[in-house]
Amino acid sequence: MLDTFFTQRFCDRCKGDLRNGRIMSMINKDCICFECSIKETQSERYEEAVAAELGEICSGNWNYDGIGFEEEE
């Protein structure tokens, strides 16, 4: 995933242009725009994702796939 992180042109979620910036999702390995990142922080599962990733990093796993993204209504 990181091999295309800096070169991909469109957000993995909304397919919007990434010219104005990009960030790695906390929920999975998607490369997302800042608008999708803001939406992600409002997800019911966001805090769970942050805690799970921190636990994995503290255990030495720097390649954690995340808890998985599920489209919310």
Image (cartoon, grey):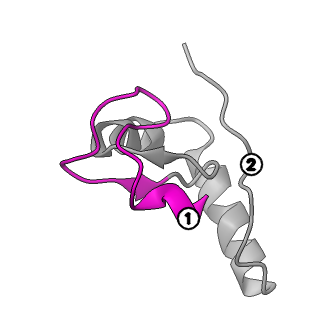
- 30 on left or right of 35: right
Q: Which residues are magenta?
A: 1-24
Residue 13 location, x and y as percent? 48, 31
Tag 1 residue: 3
For marks 1 and 2, the one nearer the N-term is 1
Q: Is residue 6 magenta?
A: yes
Residue 12 lies, with reference to residue 71, above or below; the image says below
Secondary structure of the residue carrying tag 2 is loop
Residue 43 lies, with reference to residue 62, above or below; the image says above
Give the camera-side residue of 59 and 61. Answer: 61
- Kindly identify the residue that appears in the image at 76 percent across and 74 percent down: 56
- 33 on left or right of 58: left
- Kindly identify the residue that appears in the image at 39 percent across and 61 percent down: 6
- Kindly identify the residue that appears in the image at 70 percent across and 80 percent down: 57
Give the camera-side residue of 44 and 58. Answer: 58
Instruction: Name the disc covering residue 59, or none.
Output: none
Disc 2 residue crowd, few under 14, some 14–19, many 20+, Cα 10 Å: some
Q: Amino acid at mark 1?
A: Asp
Secondary structure of the residue carrying tag 1 is helix
- 71 on left or right of 8: right
Residue 50 location, x and y as percent? 60, 60
Dominant secondary structure of the magenta stretch?
A: loop
Quadrant of res 10: top left
Q: Amino acid at mark 2?
A: Ile
Tag 2 residue: 67
- Kindly identify the residue that appears in the image at 40 percent across and 27 percent down: 15
